[in-house]
């Protein structure tokens, strides 16, 4: 409904997945996993409500993997701050919206993921303030988690689809493949 679908589709295809765009509850039933891209989380919530997709998306996430980037991470969190807002509550995380600053504070940084450097593009990015005990922090930037996995789900507070590398999408695809 919002976000850079084409860049995510390209990254998923480079990682070996068949990628399709999903906009309806019926299309959601046909996929094994989902990426919720960046955008503006309050607008995304409004669109999910208008299209009657909030509950089907929550039900999907209770059974199948979701990878949320930036605003997608906000939607997956169990608690949202600045301001508080409703979310899917699929991951035990507290996320603060726009915590790195305004649009002018957007940046590209290098992060370490399992011994490999990869580019992270932060655009009005949220900050993960708390991770639950079952959440696994995969990458940190400025002493804050920026890539987290919790069960079948994964979130990034940045935009991996805008990077030249494909390490993060590949990790998600491998996780979906190994989950069967």
Image (cartoon, grey):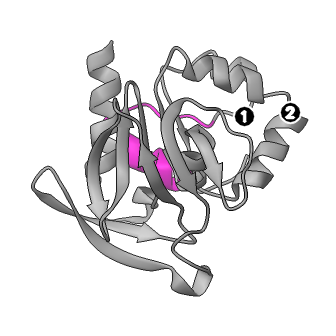
Query: Magenta segment: does it hold 14?
Result: yes
Query: Magenta segment: does it hold 170?
Result: no
Q: Residues within 10 Å of mark 2 (few under 14, many from 20)?
A: few
Task: Estimate the x, y position of residue 106 in percent, counting from the top left.
Answer: 50, 79
> Which residue carries the number 1 mark?
23
Of the two numbered discs 2 and 1 in the rendering, the one whose residue sits closer to the viewer = 2
Count of numbered badges drawn on the protein: 2
Q: Residues within 10 Å of mark 1 (few under 14, many from 20)?
A: few
Q: Residue at x 44, y 57 (%)?
A: 161
Residue 165 visible to an observer of this rendering: no
The label shown at residue 80 is: none
Q: Nearer the viewer, residue 37 or 92?
A: 92
Q: Residue at x 63, y 49 (%)?
A: 80
Which quadrant would residue 49 be assigned to in this image? top right
Q: Nearer the viewer, residue 111 or 8?
A: 111
Is 168 displayed left or right of 66 in the figure?
left
Residue 112 visible to an observer of this rendering: yes
Q: Residue at x 75, y 22 (%)?
A: 55
Kindly check if marks 2 and 1 are in contact, taking CB atoms under 8 A apart as contact.
yes
Task: Estimate the x, y position of residue 1 in percent, counting from the top left.
Answer: 73, 46
- For mark 1, give the secondary structure: loop
Which quadrant would residue 48 be assigned to in this image? top right
Is 136 displayed left or right of 97 in the figure?
left
**Residue 9 sits above or below residue 106 on the image:** above
> Which residue carries the number 2 mark?
51
Residue found at the very far right of the displayed protein: 50
Tell me which label, 2 or 1, sits earlier in the chain. 1
Is 37 displayed left or right of 115 in the figure?
right
- For mark 2, give the secondary structure: loop
Residue range corresponding to the magenta coloring: 6-21
**Residue 53 sits above or below residue 119 on the image:** above
């Amino acid at each position: 409904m919002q976000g850079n679908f084409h860049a995510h589709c390209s990254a998923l295809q480079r990682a070996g997945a068949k990628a399709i765009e999903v906009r309806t509850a019926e299309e959601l039933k046909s996929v094994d996993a989902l990426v919720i891209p960046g955008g503006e989380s309050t607008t995304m919530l409004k669109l999910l409500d208008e299209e009657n997709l909030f509950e089907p998306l929550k039900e999907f996430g209770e059974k199948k993997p979701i990878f949320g980037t930036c605003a997608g991470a906000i939607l997956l969190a169990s608690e949202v701050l600045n301001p508080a807002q409703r979310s899917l509550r699929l991951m035990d995380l507290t996320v603060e919206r726009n915590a790195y600053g305004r649009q002018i504070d957007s940046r590209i940084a290098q992060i370490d993921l399992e011994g490999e450097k990869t580019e992270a593009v932060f655009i009005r990015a949220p900050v993960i303030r708390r991770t639950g005990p079952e959440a696994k922090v995969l990458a940190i930037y400025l002493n804050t988690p920026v890539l987290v996995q919790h069960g079948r789900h994964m979130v990034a507070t940045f935009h991996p689809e805008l990077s030249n590398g494909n390490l993060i999408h590949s990790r998600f695809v491998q996780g979906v493949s190994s989950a069967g």
